[in-house]
Amino acid sequence: MNETFDFVVVGSGGGSMCAALALRAAGKSVLILEKTSLVGGTTAASGGVMWIPNNRFMKSEGIEDSEEKALAYLDAVVGDHPDAPGASRTRRIAFVRQAPKMLDFLVSQGIRLRRLPSWPDHYQQPGESVPGRAVVSELFDIVQLGEWKARLRPGFLPLPANLDEATQLPNFKRSWAAKKVLFRVIGRTLADKLGGRQRATAGQALQAQMLHAALKAGVEIRLDSPVQRILVESGRVTGVLVEKDGIASNIGARLGVLINAGGFAQSQRMRDQFIPGTSVGWSLVPETDTGEMIEEGLRIGAAVAQMNQRIGFQVALPPGDRPVKAGVQSDMSKPHAIVVDQSGVRYIRESGATVDFCRGMIERNRTVPAVPSWMVVDSQYLRKYMLAGTMPGAKKPQSWFDTKFLRRGGTLEELAADCGMDAAKLRASVDRFNGFVRKGRDEDFRRGESAYDRWLGDALHPASPSLGTIEEGPFFALQVFPGDVSTFGGLVTDEHARVLRADGSAIPGLYATGTSTASVMGPVEAGGGGSIGPTFTWAYIAAGHAVQTSGTAPIPTAAAT
Ligand SMILES: Cc1cc2nc3c(=O)[nH]c(=O)nc-3n(C[C@H](O)[C@H](O)[C@H](O)COP(=O)(O)OP(=O)(O)OC[C@H]3O[C@@H](n4cnc5c(N)ncnc54)[C@H](O)[C@@H]3O)c2cc1C
């Protein structure tokens, strides 16, 4: 070995700095190796929401939850699948028990977090939490990072606004509450400018806080350092082979190596093998998510599973030199919008979990062309709601019409002709949907019946947050693709986050977390933050196991108050 640490982490994603902090708290040396020139991974570019059942913030706000309730919910929505070892009941129990402890640990390390005031769980099932179990970072001034500021991966929301504030902003013309939020965010932006601050939000704030704490705790972080090999001696993982500035070196890890190197959302080769019919071109995940550490795990004898799973997320692909893919889940969950297949037939609940929507779209495509599908809206919609990243009521870019990204028809029949749909089928779909709107009940797909659907809808729409007629011309349509925000399959790990071989035995010294692993969520995303909550938790579990096996006292945590 060229050098040796107690623990080596591959990738600077969600759990990396959490594990590193935990090991530092136990007095261990830690090295994080990141292949890109930026810290934070997809986690920094994300909403940064963590699904943490039975958490301290729920308790302090008097919101009912318990291990039993959370487990009942996971049991109901994840289910038991023999081919999904990552989502086994043993792992579900470990996750539910350890996630709140992980959160307490972060708080004890000075990480400032809060409950999102509302993000209902995604499924109406026993144990569901309607207020939700979502935890996010407080805004964080990244100027505090000094020279590391430039090395933090940019976030997806360039405003000093909390997520719950950001979702209200588009309503500023329709609601006094939203106007107040707008003024608050403008005030904060000006105050930051005057005060020399740069407050980040969402995933960037989370990873900035983690980076700040990790540096303070003496964690060593090396960028531009791709790990190329996991080193194994006599069946035990002893370190990694890393390349830095063209020079390869072996780095030893006395207690273990944690793989937190993301999934394979940006590898078309792996998609074609494991999730055929999906494209990197529809993914919102950064280009670094290329799956090589999952393949490296396979090379040294690890088992992989759930490789066909992902967090589907419906997107539209607006034109432009540097096209920005637009997530459209929230758009299509608003009243006055439906989704139809290429023949013009409504076949799916537009609201609800994105995983299910995208899965449904691909399933439909087996019998009727439905990838892409059409999102159809009327003029009432365009006045009130955002469309593919543009503000309500705003004139849509001419290029959208020139390139036929956005189609327009004076009547539904004209729109259908322009889109190549069967006009009679589109008319029948819209008439049937309008009938449901008038009855106040979507008899085909039950849109609007779950708390999550209603939360995604429009609280200011008098009759129903989810249902509104499509009747005022001109009418508009745009294509929607089954994109994603993550793959969800990978290395099989046990309840201690140890990587397993196909025979179920653990590979000594090797741990994994995050989207490099087969997810504890199985085929679903149970609630908002269903990736990052587990990523942090399994990293914390891995650190705890490594410390425990070294014979050191357990990692200290704060009392849950
Ligand atoms: C726009 C958007 C919003 C989202 N919002 C949320 C949300 O709010 N909540 C939620 O739960 N999920 C969300 N997701 C999904 C979530 O962000 C990801 O699933 C999650 O962040 C993945 O975390 P990770 O720790 O597995 O990996 P990452 O955070 O992606 O980190 C992996 C890191 O490993 C590095 N790496 C890879 N290979 C190597 C190597 N060989 N050597 C060294 N380094 C390597 C990568 O460069 C990367 O920095 C969102 C995704 C997107 C795109």
Image: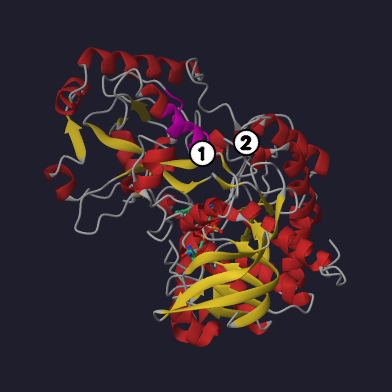
The residue beneath circle 2 is 84
Where residue 194 sits in the image (x, y, percent)?
45, 85
Q: Which of the two residues, 369 or 466, is positioned nearer the viewer here?
A: 369
At mark 2, the secondary structure is: loop
Residue 551 placed where, x, y %? 86, 70
Please tell me in which quadrant of the rendered image residue 244 appears. Answer: bottom left
Dot 1 amino acid type? Gln
* Left/right of residue 170 with respect to residue 302 in the rendered view: left
**Image quadrant for the N terminus?**
bottom right
Q: Are marks 2 and 1 in contact (CB under 8 Å)?
A: yes
How many marks on residues? Answer: 2
- Residue 8 to residue 462: above or below: below
Decide whether residue 352 is among the magenta residues. Answer: yes
- Which residues make up the magenta segment? 348-361
Amino acid at pointer 2: Ala
**x, y percentage for residue 455?**
55, 40
Q: Is residue 455 above or below residue 60?
A: above
Q: Can residue 465 be seen?
A: no
- Residues at marks 2 and 1, CA–CA distance in whole angstroms: 10 Å
Q: Is residue 138 magenta?
A: no
How far from the left and from the top, in percent, is residue 440?
Answer: 50, 20
In this picture, residue 149 sits left or right of residue 106: left
Q: Which residue is mark 1?
A: 309
